[in-house]
Amino acid sequence: DFTLWCSYKIMDVGGNGGGLPVNNKQRAMLPNKSRGEFTRNPRKDSEGMSESPDLEFEYADTDKWAAELSELYSYTEGPEFALNRKCFEEEFRAHVSDKKWTELDAAQHRAHAMRLLDGLEVIAREKRLKVARAILYMAQGTFAECSSEVEVQHWMRYNIFLLLDVGTFSALVELLNMEIDNSAACSSAVRKPAISLADSTDLRVLLNIMYLMVETIQQDDPADRPEWKIIRETFRAELGSPLFNNEPISVMLFGMVTKFCSGHAPHFPMKKVLLLLWKSILFTLGGFEQLQTIKVRKREELGLPPLPEDSIRVIRSMRAASPPASASDLIEQQQKRARREHKALIKQDNLDAFNEKDPYKADDSREDEDDNDDNDNSIETETFPLERDEVMPPPIPHPPSERVSFPKGLPWAPKVREKDIENFLESSRSKFIGYTLGSDTDTVVGLPRPIHESIKTLKQHKYVSIAEIQIAKEEEFQKTPLSGGEEEVEMCATELLYQGILPSLPQYMIALLKILLAAAPTSKAKTDSINILADVLPEEMPTTVLQSMKLGVDVNRHKEIIVKAISAILLLLLKHFKLNHIYQFEYMAQHLVFANCIPLILKFFNQNIMSYIIAKNSISVLDFPYCVVHELPELTAESLEAGDNNQFCWRNLFSCINLLRILNKLTKWKHSRTMMLVVFKSAPILKRALKVKQAMMQLYVLKLLKVQTKYLGRQWRKSNMKTMSAIYQKVRHRLNDDWAYGNDLDARPWDFQAEECALRANIERFNSRRYDKSHSNPDFLPVDNCLQSVLGQRVDLPEDFQMNYDLWLEREVFSKPISWEELLQ
């Protein structure tokens, strides 16, 4: 990485190479020369143990509004803020007196906004771009007349609602369509050896305005005027409806993503496209709180019992567990004990931690490989306290309002599927009686009393999901296409979006994963990979070390934001499609699996994930809106290197949790995909991710470890008892799920390809029945039996038939004898 190389050159490692003086604090941050990397070493106490405090992270749909605004702009775009202001002031002075924008009344504001909107209709491209920049300055809050960030955000909100009210968004969509279809710009970009910011100027200005409008309007402020609330709901409905170009705005943006990945438009500013796509989906479909509300409503409509708990509140109340120690940590601990001749009895919990990886125990070949993976891929060795006399850092106090009071015990209510009850009864009948009754779960004649109690307990915790009801209804429609009646499909925003992306959904998924691969920190630059840096590289490359460091931070930040947007898009779509109809979810999930999403996510996590989460690839003084309100201090190598004072990077932790949730969605109840986790040796990769002390992230890692535990063998379970204990404490229990030992049928190998093929056949039947009206079965179409209407239909005869009509009459009618007696009979 160029930035890290520059950082390495600035600070002299040996202290005698003519570099800047290095103090002890700086020396602790020097790059690891053996690996060529620049990492911040963990602070260690007197015992050599690393301190790993809980990360105070609260998962949400998005980061704070200011952070989401600042991530729209790359630091290379900084000079354009002044250019936007200049374009606005030229237009403003030409039509308005010397008053400031903030001094005008509402009527004058509206009149000038209408004038600017008219200016977008001119033919001259340069004039149109100047007007678009003036509108962008309005959307940025007319910051030159503001004295604080709060004031900028206030005027942003006011101006954006004004722009939306006069019809700016529709005009921007039309201009964006023109730019997408601009073949001259596309062909010019394809021929260029190096693409820079200048190649996407028009697109960036339009996408900036559209993003600011969507991001600002979706922020629900209790102090909003009543008319603003009406405007917001109208805009939400329009954004999710096929009003723009006969398709939702999200479908148009998906088209831009595929065009970019195909190589036909390498100048598209992909970060901005993905951010706008994410916020459009979030605004039109709803976030995680809305998903929970929809789920509760749908269960009520289907007559299902309410959810046993609110999963969002349960996860927020959970606390992180101490991560399991690695083999190298335990060897070090054992050597220290030997030196101190510490022969005292060790407490049981310390024994569990110590036995997690006995360095002197002969493991099988898989364990050796796992250990090698652990050591090779760890950038820095982190150790964790295992003994009584080592001091742990005091826990960070948590706000009491966020806590949810639970009785002592496990955080999740256990669940049982109908299938689990059937399997239990079948095995019990075979054992005690010697016969089976199929899917009958009520007859318990001849079974002993303890089995009766077991069945009663299982039925108390039976959970019927919305997906099971949808699958049963779909089977009924397929069995009785005529008598089943017409299906009532609710035309909500999710359904409209699915119908819009259905024809090209496989291409959309492949395109998103291609960009995710290019943005992943573990990916190496290849000649055939796509260039995602078109909207961050300046026209002239940096000439000084400081400029190079700044560009390096910008590039890393750019990639992190792309990963954040794609992970959020995929997770939102999977969750909304699953609620809308299970086969919509399965269709998208299967194409993600076919496009190698599972190994891609595992590759992403095959890094020092703690370093990724605490990475400081941001320069806070250059973030919008801070940079347009305050005087910018002089940037130095030290200030760039120090970054901000945050404990972790919010977007990177958000991305990691999203990717883990996607992996859970893809593999849940799919044994063929679970085996992919095993085949790709995900256990050591996931186990390293447990070093991040954040409860939500640990929960989804433990879920992924739980589903494959039965396939990892006895030796792995024996060596990872602390991880097994964490799974028991934090992950929901499925009664009768023998996850830890694998004695059931699920642990046996079978034809996994058949499972995917059967699922694919069900998906295709669903899509064909509901959406493919042109290829419906002709046997099921209604027949017209009325003689008058049949004869009255106009039939278009081919031209050659019309020319030879006389010959046809002679051959088929006049020359053939007609037996009138038989015809009358």
Image: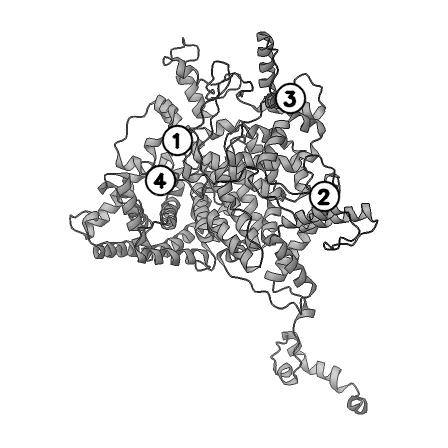
Q: Secondary structure at mark 2?
A: helix
Answer with the quarter of the image where residue 402 lies: top left
Q: Amino acid at mark 3?
A: Asn
- How far apart in space, not on screen, are marks 2 and 1 (Cα)? 45 Å
Foreground pick, 380 / 383: 383
Give the mark nearer the N terminus: 3 vs 1.
3
Labelled pair 2, 1 in contact (Cβ < 8 Å): no
Residue that carries the numbered disc 1 in the rendered image: 618
Q: Residues within 10 Å of mark 3 (few under 14, many from 20)?
A: some
Foreground pick, 390 / 380: 390
Residue that carries the numbered disc 4 in the rendered image: 66
Labelled pair 2, 3 in contact (Cβ < 8 Å): no
Disc 3 or disc 1, which is closer to the eye?
A: 3
Residue in the image at 54% along x and 48% along y: 575
Give the mark nearer the N terminus: 1 vs 4.
4
Give the mark nearer the N terminus: 2 vs 3.
3
Give the mark nearer the N terminus: 4 vs 2.
4
- How far apart in space, not on screen, are marks 4 and 2 (Cα)? 47 Å
Q: Amino acid at mark 1?
A: Ser
- How far apart in space, not on screen, are marks 3 and 1 (Cα)? 41 Å
Q: Amino acid at mark 4?
A: Ala
Foreground pick, 254 / 686: 686
Q: Is residue 122 left or right of residue 698?
A: left
Q: Which mark is residue 752?
A: 2
Residue that carries the numbered disc 3 in the rendered image: 355
Q: Secondary structure at mark 4?
A: helix
Q: Residues within 10 Å of mark 2 (few under 14, many from 20)?
A: few
